[in-house]
Image (spheres, helix red, strand yellow):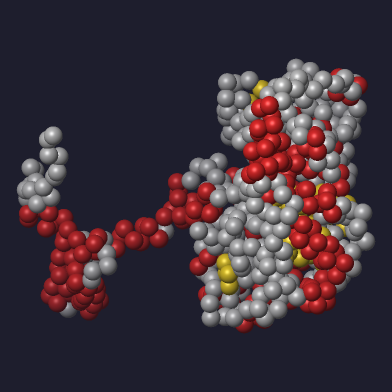
């Protein structure tokens, strides 16, 4: 066998002339000597000073041993680091395309700024999008379209055990903690929520004085650190929770199981951003990063989680209680659903946070490669609740890169009850997407605890912009709802949106996504076998998968003869529903029930494409 080893000490075949290489590497350093000599000849002190500084820096570059580029290219190597530091700004202001999302496009940011400033958000000369590209979606307008007078759309949240139901807006401020955001930003967001009558999620950083100053409605989020209601050892304090949850401002309680940008990681607040005020609000120390544990100490099983939210419901005086999660292992969520059924106790709401959600600080691997995206996670939760026959008992909110009226209307059309936005409202208070939230050097004072940077954020002005952004976004969504021929976004359905497929054909979202039928998981008759298998694996008494039950189920399925596809007579409404883009469904009830319980021909659901039909 031929020896393929390379002699690393071999002379190069094409040697660069030594003098030429020396000039390329040290030319700028040599220029510093020229400047010094010129200053001495002309007796110009500023040239002498510039030359001395250049020579000193060049010598330092040569003798230091941390940066190879600077040793090989003294002085000139610094250009590389300058450009690297300003790369995001250079890209954003000089090179970025209007529709490239990193993570939000210039077009998306401009829309948020325009609506926040209450100026025209119209554009001219036609769409910039390729309407024939794969994945393009659009609403199907109606010949019975009409303008809507009411745009302050609301949904009632509160189940049978809830004593204080809350009428929540269909568009609210998503979870952002005091500490991750500045005091001025929190104050502006809450004042804007007060002006517009919509909800402001506190994030897991507890209820700060700035949340309470203007009296805007709050959703108090409890993370694994139980900030604002914790004992000194970090465990849950029922006494502190009972005291603070009964504030009139607190409208709902949200248990955070995980969040989209860093599911399974817990929260991180760098110590550089922890002030004495934050430490007091959260009951933490200032000399180390504030890290929320990856999991809760108040419960360890799905059944214990059910009992925990009932405890919170009672301690808060009967306010709506729910939980938020970024979907991970599907059988774990199904285990929670089984525990609900076993305990006959249901959360008032569930919030699905997509993996595309934002954060102030998280490892890149978690942001990019952990957690389920919003649509996939929502459809799994929605279909599980429908399959278990309890979807009507629980409201579902969603969050994850939702900023425009179309984004909101689309999620409501496929089954969500309301939407939350974090970065959209950050743009409203002045965020420019500098992506420096974790450095405590936010240039606009939004995501920093630096008092001098915060001073730039004028609270009354930004509060008005928060209100404007919410109002104008709902007004735009009302225009979409009216164009479809409906009166409220709750009437939107998957068949109101068309999608272009890879082969150029068109499908309604009711045919593109998989929607299951009511109660099918209870007898393991879901059309998508993967749902039956995950349901079998789910355990109400453990978050671990019941693999033995799955093995037994699969063995049993192999022994039994195949069951023919379930046949049933379609209802009158089903006969009238559109089966493709060419059928307008003339004569259909203008306010039908949700199609997710009747559409038997849907064959696509992202990761779960094993529907036998």
Residue in the image at 55% along x and 56% along y? 433
Q: Which residue lies furthest to the front in this view?
A: 559
Residue 372 lies, with reference to residue 579, above or below; the image says below
- In the image, 26: left or right of 543? left
Residue in the image at 69% along x and 54% along y? 542
Tag count = 0
Can residue 345 be seen in the rendering of this structure? yes
Quarter of the figure with the N terminus: top left
- In the image, 520: left or right of 431? right
- Indicate the position of residue 35 as horizontal and vertical percent values: 18, 69
Image quarter for residue 577? top right
- Indicate the position of residue 171 as horizontal and vertical percent values: 77, 51
- Name the residue nearer the viewer: 367 or 346: 346
Can residue 353 be seen in the rendering of this structure? no
Quarter of the figure with the C terminus: top right
- In the image, 305: left or right of 224? right
- In the image, 57: left or right of 583? left
- Name the residue nearer the viewer: 234 or 58: 234
Residue in the image at 84% along x and 54% along y? 343
- Indicate the position of residue 384 as horizontal and vertical percent values: 75, 41
Image quarter for residue 276? bottom right
Residue in the image at 16% along x and 61% along y? 26
- Name the residue nearer the viewer: 371 or 563: 563
Residue 68 lies, with reference to residue 489, above or below; the image says below
- Indicate the position of residue 330 as horizontal and vertical percent values: 66, 45
Image quarter for residue 70? bottom left
């Amino acid at each position: 066998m031929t020896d393929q080893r390379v002699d690393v000490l071999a002379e190069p075949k094409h040697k660069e002339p030594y003098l030429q290489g020396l000039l390329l590497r040290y030319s700028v350093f040599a220029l510093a000597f020229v400047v010094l000599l010129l200053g001495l000849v002309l007796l110009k002190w500023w040239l002498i000073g510039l030359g001395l500084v250049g020579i000193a820096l060049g010598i330092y570059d040569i003798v230091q041993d941390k940066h190879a580029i600077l040793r090989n290219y003294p002085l000139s190597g610094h250009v590389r680091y300058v450009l690297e530091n300003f790369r995001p700004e250079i890209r954003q202001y000089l090179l970025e395309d209007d529709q490239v999302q990193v993570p939000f496009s210039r077009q998306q940011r401009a829309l948020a700024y325009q609506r926040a400033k209450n100026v025209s958000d119209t554009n001219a000369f036609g769409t910039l999008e390729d309407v024939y590209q794969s994945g393009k979606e659009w609403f199907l307008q109606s010949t019975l379209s009409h303008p809507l007078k009411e745009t302050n759309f609301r949904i009632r949240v509160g189940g049978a055990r809830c004593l204080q139901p809350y009428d929540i807006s269909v568009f609210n401020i998503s979870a952002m903690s005091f500490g991750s955001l500045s005091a001025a930003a929190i104050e502006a967001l809450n004042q804007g929520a007060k002006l517009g009558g919509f909800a402001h999620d506190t994030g897991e950083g507890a209820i700060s004085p700035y949340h309470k100053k203007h009296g805007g409605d709050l959703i108090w989020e409890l993370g694994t650190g139980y900030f604002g209601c914790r004992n000194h050892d970090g465990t849950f304090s029922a006494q502190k929770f009972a005291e603070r949850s009964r504030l009139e401002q607190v409208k709902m309680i949200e248990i955070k199981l995980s969040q989209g940008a860093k599911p399974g990681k817990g929260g991180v607040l760098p110590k550089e951003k922890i002030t004495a005020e934050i430490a007091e609000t959260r009951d933490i120390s200032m000399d180390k990063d504030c890290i929320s544990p990856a999991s809760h100490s108040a419960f360890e099983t799905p059944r214990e989680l059910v009992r925990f939210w009932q405890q919170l419901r009672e301690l808060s005086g009967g306010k709506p209680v729910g939980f938020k999660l970024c979907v991970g292992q599907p059988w774990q969520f199904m285990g929670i659903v089984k525990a609900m059924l076993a305990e006959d106790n249901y959360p008032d709401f569930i919030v699905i946070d997509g993996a595309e959600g934002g954060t102030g600080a998280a490892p890149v691997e978690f942001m990019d490669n952990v957690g389920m995206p919003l649509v996939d996670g929502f459809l799994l939760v929605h279909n599980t609740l429908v399959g278990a026959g309890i979807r009507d008992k629980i409201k579902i909110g969603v969050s994850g890169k939702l900023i425009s009226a179309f984004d909101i209307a689309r999620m409501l059309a496929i089954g969500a009850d309301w939407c939350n936005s974090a970065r959209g409202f950050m743009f409203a208070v002045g965020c420019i997407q500098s992506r420096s939230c974790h450095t405590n050097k936010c240039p606009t004072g939004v995501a920093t605890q630096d008092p001098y940077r915060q001073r730039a954020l004028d609270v009354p002005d930004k509060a008005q912009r928060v209100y404007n952004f919410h109002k104008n976004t709902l007004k735009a969504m009302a225009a979409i709802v009216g164009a479809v021929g409906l009166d409220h976004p709750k009437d939107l359905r998957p068949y109101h949106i068309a999608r272009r497929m890879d082969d150029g054909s068109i499908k309604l979202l009711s045919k593109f996504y998989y929607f299951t039928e009511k109660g099918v998981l209870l007898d393991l008759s879901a059309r998508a076998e993967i749902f039956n298998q995950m349901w079998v694996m789910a355990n109400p008494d453990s978050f671990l998968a019941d693999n033995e039950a799955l093995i037994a189920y699969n063995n049993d399925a192999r022994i039994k003869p195949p069951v023919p596809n379930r046949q049933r007579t379609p209802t009158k409404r089903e006969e009238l529903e559109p089966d493709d883009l060419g059928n307008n469904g003339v004569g259909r009830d203008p306010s039908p029930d949700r199609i997710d319980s009747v559409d038997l021909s849907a064959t696509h659901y992202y990761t779960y494409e094993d529907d036998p039909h």
